[in-house]
Amino acid sequence: MPKHVIHTHNAPQAIGTYSQAIKVNRTVYLSGQIPLVPATMTMVDGDIIAQITQVFENLQAVTHAAGGDLNDIVKLNVFLTDLAHFPIVNEIMGNYFHQPYPARAAIGVAALPKGAGVEMDGIMVLPVQEYA
């Protein structure tokens, strides 16, 4: 089964031995995104609201590069260093997704790369292309 690497300059470049996403048929496996600003590869300035927003922006850029959008995500994993921030994730997520929402898990972790407070990864399924 052929795998296709998804890459965009509109999301942070991989900082390790991984791809931004891998597409197999219509399924796209999105690597974890932390709140790095793509242009500078530095952490976004600001609080957890800015971090969560940047992560959704980064995920959105990768979904677009794969030929879809955030609403094609069927499974979203949210990793937080402080689960007290989960209501903020819900609030901001409502600005990026509409129903039906993806299946989701929220996991509390001790630490994330580069001191991030949040990381998200997911699986998306691209819609069937219809041709006239």
Image (cartoon, grey):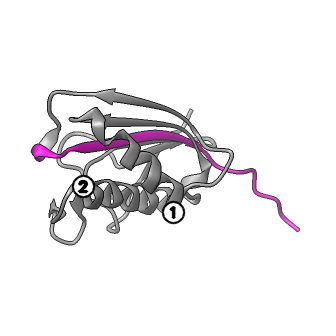
- Relative placement, left or right, of 67 versus 79 is right
So how many labels did they put on this image?
2
| Residue carrying label 1 | 64
Percent position of residue 115, x then y: 10, 44
User: Eyeballing the image, is 28 above or below 48?
Assistant: above
Q: Amino acid at mark 2?
A: Pro
Q: Is residue 77 left or right of residue 94?
A: left
Q: Nearer the viewer, mark 2 or mark 1?
A: 2
Question: Which residue is rendered at x = 68% and y = 45% of the image?
Answer: 100
Q: Please name the residue shown 15% across and 27% down the image.
A: 110
Q: Start and end of the magenta stretch?
A: 114-132
Placement of 107 over or under 120, stated as above or below: above
Image-quadrant location for residue 83: top left
Task: Please report the residue visible at 14 percent of the width from the left and 33 percent of the height from the top.
Answer: 111
Quadrant in the rendering for residue 119: top left
Q: Earlier in the sequence, mark 2 or mark 1?
A: 2
Does 57 appear above or below 29?
below
Where does label 2 land, which residue?
35
Res 82 quadrant in image: top left
In magenta segment, residue 121: yes
The answer to whether residue 117 is magenta is: yes
Q: Amino acid at mark 1?
A: His
Quadrant the C terminus occupies: bottom right
Quadrant containing the N terminus is: top right
Mark 2 and mark 1: Cα distance apart in space? 18 Å
Q: Secondary structure at mark 1?
A: helix
